[in-house]
Image (cartoon, coloured by chain):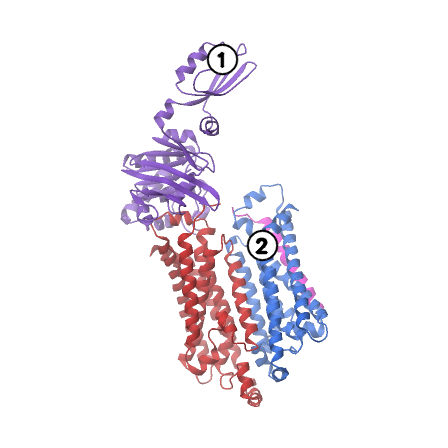
Chain colours: A purple, B blue, C red
Amino acid sequence: MNIIETKKLTKYYGKARGIIDVDMTVEEGEIYGFIGPNGAGKSTTIRTLLGLMKPTGGSATIFGKDITKYGPQIKQEIGYLPSEVFYYDGMKAIDLLKYSASFYQKDKKFTEKRIQELSGILDLDLSKKIDDLSYGNKKKVGIVQGLLHQPKLIILDEPTGGLDPLIQQKFFNLLKEENEKGATILFSSHILSEVQKMCDKVAIIKEGKIIKTEKISDLLENQTKRFRIETAMKADKKDFAIKGVDDLSITDNSVTFLFRGHLNDIMREIAKLDLANISIEEPDLEEIFLHYYQK
Amino acid sequence: MNVILRELKAHWKGILFWSLGMIALIGSGMAKYDAYQSTGQSINQLMAQFPKSVQIILGISGFDLTTAAGFYGLLFIYIAIMAAIHATLIGSDMIAKEERDKTSEFLFSKPISRAKAITGKLLAGFVILVIFNLVTTLSSIYMVQYFNKGASANHDILLLMAGLAFLQLIFFSVGAAVAGINKHQKSSASIATSVLLLTFILYFVINLNDKLDFLKYLSPFKYFEAHAIITNGLDPFYMVLSLIITVVLIASTYFTYSRRDLSV
Amino acid sequence: MNIFWREIKAYRKSTIIWVLVLSAITIVFLLLYPGFTKDVEATRKMLSGIPAAYRNALGLSLDNFFTIFGFLGYLFTFVLLAGAAQAMSLGTGIISKEDSGKTSDFLLSKPVTRTKVLTSKLSAALVLLAATNIFFSLASYGVARVVSTANFSAKTFFLISATLFLVQLFFWALGALFAVIIPKIKSVISVTLPTVFAFFIVSTIGAFIGNDNVRLVTPFKFYDYQYIIAHNTYEWKYVIIEAVCIAVAIVASFIIYLKKDVRAAS
């Protein structure tokens, strides 16, 4: 079954673009990455799916149900963690979590047990007032409130900001566990490595449109790398005239380019050169967009 | 300077809204005078004979309602309460907004001292009060003249507006001082306006009973009563008292706001 | 019911403060009532010399003016003013706080309809206002009993004190409407207080020349105390006018709130 399915989902803010004709299919059990630079439309898509905003065109279903008609019913089974969390003044973490739990039909004992478990794993002090928590700890409250009802669909909008690496790792483990138990996850991010680590499939969004949907395994096969080479003698452009090379620049003895494809192919070419130095790096997302997804 | 400009820009919509509101208040108030005139003099004479308590309840004590100036004097307390609300809100908003809108980190990570930031904000607030007073003065002069058939009332109006300026200063500094000391900025405006409401109601309570006259120092609305100003001019004692209150409150704003921890 | 109880809890403290404030206003004024009655005879004499037509134009009734109810009618000017400020701030704040506190994301990603959110919030506000009125009425009834010398009808008293609730209902609905119409309310009081005072001033300036039209536009004059004292009932025309105003405001609030986009925080 498709957990999320959007058809030409469109959202305009007045005349300003939000998202245009987004077609997206998230299947059950997937961890689905949603990646793009700032302002591309990730949050707009998610907020529209959650019914925080009404679409201006197209349609979407979650669990096979139309989002505009069955919003609350659908949300029984959704956990959501926004990129920035804000909660009520004067409430303790435990009050907020209990308040959160009170919205779901799940058994009270069950959710209370989950609250204790999850906050234990994340090392969160429940007796503190939320106002007094640090940003990272507020974020933990956000994670717990998003997972405490064991949702079938977890929606995460750039969730890792403010979490230290250790907690981030624990959080990813939690997500993987939920996924193994059957939860589907929509994971929005602008950090490629994060998505590569977590996801099975990834949709790339730019300027409001989904420009590509790929399996992570394909993406890994077609890894994009930035090469920086220093050669003994000035290299010739012809040496790099193979498929997958982009953004080639040669100055004096140094060469840089992006390569996408099988690494063996390019390594064979490079091996023919008289190398002084070489570095192979992960390009940042902007670079990938610039050179592969612009057109 | 950048802080002043920023605050003025942030408040221009409010200034516009309040200006239009004051023009409407004064205009419609004086239009009432026109309607009142047509009911004839006899009611006015009759009213003058009422005991003070009755006059107070009818809201007409001490004014010659046959003249536009007298009628304007009757309106003054309402102009004053609006001015006071405005000044209080501006005063508390200027100081409270950075913490309330969670921009205090932004502002105070800049190379600016808190005292300097407050100075900028208070100056911006002062400019807004001046604009408010000017709009009120000009529209009062115009509206009263429009309906007036007798002698010019400009002198009275200018005196009243000077009194209004003192009231504005007092309540502006009340707002600022409350926000200066308060740590939970969401409640600053409510606390400051509660003080204002209290003094406003106290004004009517004092009027109702002579024995409570000693409480008059607690209500700035008593300092600048229209009929007293029209008959005797501004009382130097109250002017000095107002300035002292203002200076003390502003100083305490600097003192508390510069020393306490800001909430993020 | 969870949202309802959450809001009751969140506003419990401020409601208690409001009950105290409203009661304090009433008690302070009522304590001045005995002093006020000393002018009775002189005024009566003078008033009886005035032709009835004039007296009516001024809204003065010989019989009522110096009774405790006549005085209540006067002091209620201030009770209504403060009560209106409470009601409108509550109506606006209870809705707009999700927006200004950036908690809309949290609340609206929960499995609840927006209809339910708004219904819960508005009914919580309503219950809080009702509670305010119950405590306020009882407190001021006690004091009025003490200071009054004669002619004390409990029915008349409660008819008068219930006008507080009726006027609050109007501002509760108006507050809700403002909350959904005005984008990004950062400070509730700077929206509600000027509004309440604008109505107050219109009603007061309108009243001292006895203009009847003003009663149609300001809730502070929907309930004429002279009439209540004389007839022991409300003028139903104004009750209906108010009911219509409230219905329109609430329906409009729902329509707007249900359609509203919740934009990303900050």
Q: Quadrant of residue C176?
A: bottom left
Q: Horizontal placement of B124 versus A194: left or right? A: right
Under mark 1, the amino acid is: Lys
By secondary structure, the bulk of the magenta-drawn segment is best described as helix
Instruction: Write down the residue under mark 2.
Output: B13
**Number of marks drawn:** 2
The reply to whether dot 1 and dot 2 touch (C-beta < 8 Å) is: no
Foreground pick, A267 / A23: A23
**Relative to C57, residue A156 above or below:** above
* x then y, percent, for residue A14: 47, 47
Task: Check disc 1 and report the residue beneath it.
Answer: A238
Q: CA distance from mark 1 to mark 2?
A: 63 Å
In front here: B96 or A12? Answer: A12
Give x and y (percent) for residue C190.
Answer: 53, 58
Which stretch is magenta? B236-264
Q: In the rendered structure, which amino acid carries the disc numbered 2?
A: Lys
Residue A81 image point, x, y percent:
39, 42
